[in-house]
Image (tube, rainbow, N blue to C red):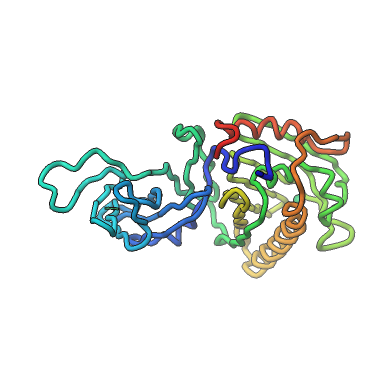
């Protein structure tokens, strides 16, 4: 029986690779979204994601398949698919190949990552992901990746689960108690002050803006004086049990490179500490469909109503 009363894979954009890992001409096998996929970068530089198995007799395109032009050639009988996934050539066939398509996935590449669009009903992308780090000098992404036994819906519920901050994380209530949550279409925005005690007992209070864009991408921005820091988190269902979470950090480079590096290091330490503090709770909890909430809880019911929009096919994945 499923651990959750909703599909394993919501509708939305999900990161499946780092851009730098997709080398032109190489085929990579991916297992995400509860299925087998292949990704490759064609000779035009564009990234593509196809179903792993050939529509002909089912060979795995990631096992011996090779990039040809913008497309890929199957290792079994040499069918060649173009960059749009259409069958372009059947070796030795002296007529036009039949109208056959490899299973293709809409992709977008931004913020250093490759995303695929999943929709249970096969609908085209319903929103775009925001672009970050487009101007100014930013530090290179620092990347930490985790695999956790939890559904992605639970991961972002954590952001508005106010009362766990003080029980699980090294935080105390902020002096200026800002906590504003808004839901607009596919975006949840949380403006809040947090006071972190992980580095000093007296606490360090900062204003944060967290933007959750669909079920697969989260940006946490902190701007404080000359500091401009971005924690960019992608979360992708691997299968019905496991999610992969990638925490990327980048900040506007300050004049003092050593100081920049130390701030980045401290931030990474706190972010990763906070993340790992949640892991045992996520991996062992059950999902309560009708929780008894109190006034100190965050807007959990509103969050769940909002997240429901990402399930076009309840009970399916
Ligand atoms: S299985 Fe792919 S060409 Fe035959
Ligand atoms: Fe948490």
Q: Position of residue 159 (x, y in %)?
A: 73, 44
Q: Position of residue 125 (x, y in %)?
A: 47, 35
Name of the residue lying farthest toward the front: 1
**Which residue is more in the foreground, 82 or 64?**
64
**Which residue is more in the foreground, 144 or 197?**
144
**Count of numbered circles on the image:** 0
**Which residue is more in the foreground, 41 or 220?**
41
Name of the residue lying farthest toward the left: 94
In the rendered image, is residue 40 in sight?
A: yes
Residue 197 falls in which quadrant of the image? bottom right
- Left or right of 223: which side holds 232? left
- Left or right of 178: which side holds 9? left
Q: Position of residue 191 (x, y in %)?
A: 73, 40
Residue 261 against residue 213 in the figure, above or below:
below
- Left or right of 291: which side holds 143? left
Q: Which quarter of the image is occupied by the C terminus? A: top right
Q: Position of residue 214 (x, y in %)?
A: 59, 39
Q: Which quarter of the image is occupied by the N terminus? A: top right
At x 63% / y 47%, what residue is drawn?
219
At x 55% / y 32%, what residue is drawn?
313
Residue 122 falls in which quadrant of the image? top left
In the rendered image, is residue 112 in sight?
A: no
Residue 80 against residue 301 in the figure, above or below:
below
At x 68% / y 54%, what residue is drawn?
226
């Amino acid at each position: 029986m499923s651990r959750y009363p909703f599909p394993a894979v919501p509708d939305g954009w999900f990161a499946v690779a780092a851009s730098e890992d997709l080398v032109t001409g190489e085929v990579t096998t991916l297992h995400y979204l509860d299925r087998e996929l292949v990704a490759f970068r064609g000779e035009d530089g564009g990234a593509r994601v196809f179903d792993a198995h050939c529509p002909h007799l089912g060979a795995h395109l990631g096992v011996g398949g090779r990039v040809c032009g913008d497309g890929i050639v199957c290792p079994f009988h040499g069918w060649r698919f173009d960059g749009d996934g259409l069958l372009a050539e059947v070796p030795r066939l002296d007529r036009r190949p039949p109208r056959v398509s490899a299973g293709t996935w809409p992709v977008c590449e931004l913020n250093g990552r490759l995303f695929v669009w999943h929709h249970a009903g096969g609908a085209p992308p319903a929103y775009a992901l925001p672009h970050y780090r487009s101007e100014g000098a930013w530090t290179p992404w620092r990347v930490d990746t985790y695999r956790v036994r939890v559904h992605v819906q639970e991961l972002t519920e954590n952001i508005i689960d106010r009362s766990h901050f003080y029980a699980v994380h090294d935080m105390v209530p902020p002096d200026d108690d800002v906590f504003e949550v808004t839901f607009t279409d596919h975006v949840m925005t949380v403006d809040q002050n947090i006071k972190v005690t992980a580095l000093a007992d007296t606490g360090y209070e900062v204003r944060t803006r967290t933007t959750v864009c669909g079920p697969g991408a989260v940006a946490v921005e902190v701007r404080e004086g000359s500091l401009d820091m971005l924690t960019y988190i992608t979360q992708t269902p691997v299968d019905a049990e496991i999610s992969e979470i990638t925490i990327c950090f980048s900040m506007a480079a300050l004049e003092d490179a050593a100081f920049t590096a130390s701030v980045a290091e401290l931030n990474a330490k706190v972010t990763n500490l906070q993340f790992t503090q949640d892991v045992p709770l996520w991996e062992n909890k059950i999902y309560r469909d009708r929780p008894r909430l109190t006034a100190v809880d965050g807007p959990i019911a509103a969050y769940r109503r909002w997240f429901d929009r990402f399930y076009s096919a309840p009970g399916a994945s």
